[in-house]
């Protein structure tokens, strides 16, 4: 076990100016003192790290030694005498609202998130957004209350206790309920304070962090994918890309693709923790040296196994609304869509299961093209007011008393093609919203189930997607012609071509089924044939018409053709016509269930 190391990525997220960078600095410095790291030279910077990356190592806690992957999976990188080490790579994310895309990217490569809160301010807008992102992308969380030096000395503990309770309450409604909260001062005295001023609470934080960290299961199978955070060239050797392996594994001599540059490169050498290695896998921080290319072309981005990523123009996603997002998610609305590690504008169309399948369990690893789906004007959710709901029901065909489907989907059409892995995370946000208002800009999150690579997907692919709108039309029986036919009105507009509807079934409120037979006159009226004939009760209800018609005789028909009003049944008998129209059917057929 000697000389072995494991890496975990810990994200440092929070509102602007909460002290994330100061905290990352304090952690790396404190951890490298003798108490935590006996060999000063092992205060590794890991592979060359970008601005937002720093790291420190502590002896691997005994608790984690059993969890250490098999010896062959972990490189022997230190001198034989060295204790196994836990390397904590801190991913210092920006806090400014405009950099949320970077934050989302950062959150996807971390194993644990430290949410930094300015203890004098509490939760702020971007702290809340980070918490939302954490819930989507991370498994574990730890809250750091920073700047405790700013609290009045006499009331410090009381203020810390109060804020700790407040944070615990905030976490109560999240998946991080019960997560630890810890007070620190990363840079007591603020920017003006001398560098000699020691940070407070950092040793305790490192201890807590070490106790909270678990080594996530790392899976070497699947296609190799690495998120690159730094790229530079070494004269005479090649170009080095450093980053975190998101999936799969890699060995010396393998070919990798840089999708953004559309090039393939051979791996010439690799380093982990400054030591050469011959292979690496998911979760490792790695530097890969490949044959020379201009490092300026790839500051951040992805490298992958050849042809394992797809460049797509549209996608089918499964999604959930983020409850803090105010307002509805409307079909045709545009959002900023983060797909994997890229963000582009996209337009959405929402759809749900057919109402009888509302209770089906969500399927999050594939999209079933054999099923039919119900178009929705907007994403259905419980927080729609009941009044709104009834309107939405009518428009969307939602049948049931406000109950929501277990799973909903959207077709996303991107303004620019994006390159992403299969089943990657998708986050929709409204980044154009005013960053100074106290609202959550993150609107929904989900999983990419199917990417459309063909640029002409609208013609080549969409007709296969069976999303329908349920159309209801209502009319009334105006009068009876004979036992097996009636004249209806108010179902179509005068200008409607009734011919298109001939053969469709209509239901009478008296229970009979009829078939639209032909137009009648020029005013949108039509003749309905009732194959089973009118029942005696129905005839009774429609009787007044019978009588009047009997008296009026032929004159009635003449008047009808002039378009004058007819006497009607004492109780109106309604006609209802229901059919499906598939959104992507080029022939715009009207389909009724058998
Ligand atoms: N008094 C006091 N000031 C602090 C403390 N930690 C950080 N600061 C100050 O707060 C300011 C912001 O600190 P940063 O570490 O840059 O904050 P940040 O969260 O990284 O900011 P962004 O990356 O811009 O979001 C600086 O002026 C720090 O000196 C602290 O514990 N006490
Ligand atoms: Mg910072």
Image (cartoon, rainbow, N blue to C red):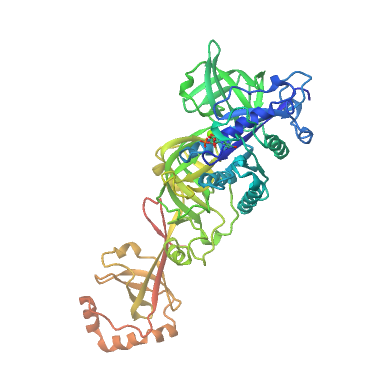
State the image coordinates of residue 353 (x, y, percent, origin top left).
52, 56
Q: Is residue 223 above or below residue 464?
A: above
Q: What is the total number of numbered labels drawn onto the structure image?
A: 0
Q: Nearer the viewer, residue 2 or 568?
A: 2
Left or right: where 49 falls relative to 65: left
Task: Spot the residue most to the top.
Answer: 236
Residue at 57% in and 27% down: 305
Q: Residue at x 29, y 84 (%)?
A: 567
**Residue 134: image x %, image y %?**
58, 43
Quarter residue 536 falls in: bottom left
- Front residue of 356/549: it is 356
Residue at 22% of width from left, 80% of height from top?
559
Task: Tell me which residue sits at (53%, 47%) in the image.
Answer: 124
The answer to whether residue 365 is seen in the rendering is: no
Of residues 129 and 308, the one drawn nearer to the viewer in this rendering: 129
Q: Is residue 273 left or right of residue 518?
A: right
| Quarter holding ligand 1 | top right
Give the left or right position of residue 549, taking residue 144 as reference. Answer: left
Q: Position of residue 203 (x, y in %)?
A: 70, 34
Q: Quadrant of the N terminus?
A: top right
User: Which of the two residues, 76 or 150, is positioned nearer the viewer here?
Assistant: 150
Q: Position of residue 555 (x, y in %)?
A: 22, 84
Furthest-front residue in view?
A: 154
């Amino acid at each position: 076990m000697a000389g072995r190391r494991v890496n975990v990525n810990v994200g440092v997220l929070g509102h602007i100016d909460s002290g994330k960078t100061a905290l990352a600095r304090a952690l790396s410095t404190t951890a490298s003192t003798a108490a935590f790291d006996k060999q000063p030279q092992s205060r590794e910077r890991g592979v060359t790290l970008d601005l937002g990356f720093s790291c420190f190592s502590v002896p691997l806690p005994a608790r984690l030694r059993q969890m250490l992957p098999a010896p062959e999976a972990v490189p022997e990188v230190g001198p034989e005498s060295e204790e196994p080490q836990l390397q904590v790579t801190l991913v210092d994310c920006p806090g400014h609202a405009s950099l949320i895309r970077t934050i989302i990217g950062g959150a996807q490569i971390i194993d644990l998130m430290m949410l930094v809160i300015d203890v004098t301010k509490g939760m702020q807008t971007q702290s809340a957004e980070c918490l939302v992102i954490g819930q989507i992308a991370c498994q574990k969380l730890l809250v750091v209350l920073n700047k405790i030096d700013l609290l009045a000395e006499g009331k410090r503990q009381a203020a810390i206790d109060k804020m700790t309770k407040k944070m615990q309450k905030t976490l109560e409604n999240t998946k991080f309920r019960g997560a630890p909260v810890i007070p620190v001062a990363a840079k007591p005295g603020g920017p003006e304070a001398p560098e000699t001023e020691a940070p407070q609470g950092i040793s305790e934080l490192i201890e807590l962090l070490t106790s909270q960290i678990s080594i996530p299961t790392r899976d070497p199978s699947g296609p190799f994918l690495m998120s690159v955070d730094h790229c530079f060239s070494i004269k005479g050797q090649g170009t080095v890309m450093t980053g975190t392996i998101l999936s799969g594994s890699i060995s010396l001599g393998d070919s990798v693709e840089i999708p953004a540059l559309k090039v393939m490169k051979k791996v010439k050498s690799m380093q982990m923790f400054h030591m050469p290695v011959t292979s690496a896998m998911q979760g490792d921080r790695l530097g890969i040296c490949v044959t020379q290319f201009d490092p300026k072309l790839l500051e951040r981005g992805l490298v992958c196994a050849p042809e394992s990523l797809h460049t797509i123009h549209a996608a089918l996603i499964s999604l959930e609304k983020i409850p803090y997002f105010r307002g509805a998610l409307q079909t045709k609305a545009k959002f900023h869509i983060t797909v994997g590690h890229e963000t582009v504008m996209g337009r959405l169309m929402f759809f749900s299961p057919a109402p009888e399948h509302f209770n089906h369990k969500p399927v999050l690893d594939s999209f079933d093209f054999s099923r039919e789906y119900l178009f929705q004007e907007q994403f259905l959710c419980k927080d729609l007011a009941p009044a709104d709901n009834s309107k939405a029901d009518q428009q969307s065909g939602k049948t049931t008393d406000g109950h929501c489907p277990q799973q909903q989907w959207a077709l996303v059409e991107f303004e620019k093609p994006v390159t992403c892995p299969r089943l990657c995370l998708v986050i929709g946000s409204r980044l154009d919203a005013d960053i100074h208002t106290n609202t959550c800009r993150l609107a929904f999150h989900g999983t990419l189930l199917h990417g459309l690579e063909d640029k002409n997907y609208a013609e080549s692919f969409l007709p296969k997607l069976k999303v329908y709108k349920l159309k209801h039309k209502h009319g009334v029986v105006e009068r009876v012609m004979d036992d097996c036919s009636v004249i209806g009105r108010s179902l179509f507009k005068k200008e409607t071509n009734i011919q298109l509807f001939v053969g469709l079934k209509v239901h009478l409120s008296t229970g009979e089924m009829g078939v639209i037979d032909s137009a009648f006159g020029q005013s949108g009226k039509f003749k309905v044939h009732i194959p089973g004939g009118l029942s005696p009760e129905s005839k009774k209800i429609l009787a007044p018409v019978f009588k009047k018609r009997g008296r009026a005789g032929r004159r009635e028909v003449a008047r009808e053709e002039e378009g004058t009003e007819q006497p009607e049944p004492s109780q109106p008998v309604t006609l209802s016509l229901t059919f499906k129209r598939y959104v992507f059917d080029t022939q715009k057929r009207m389909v009724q269930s058998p």
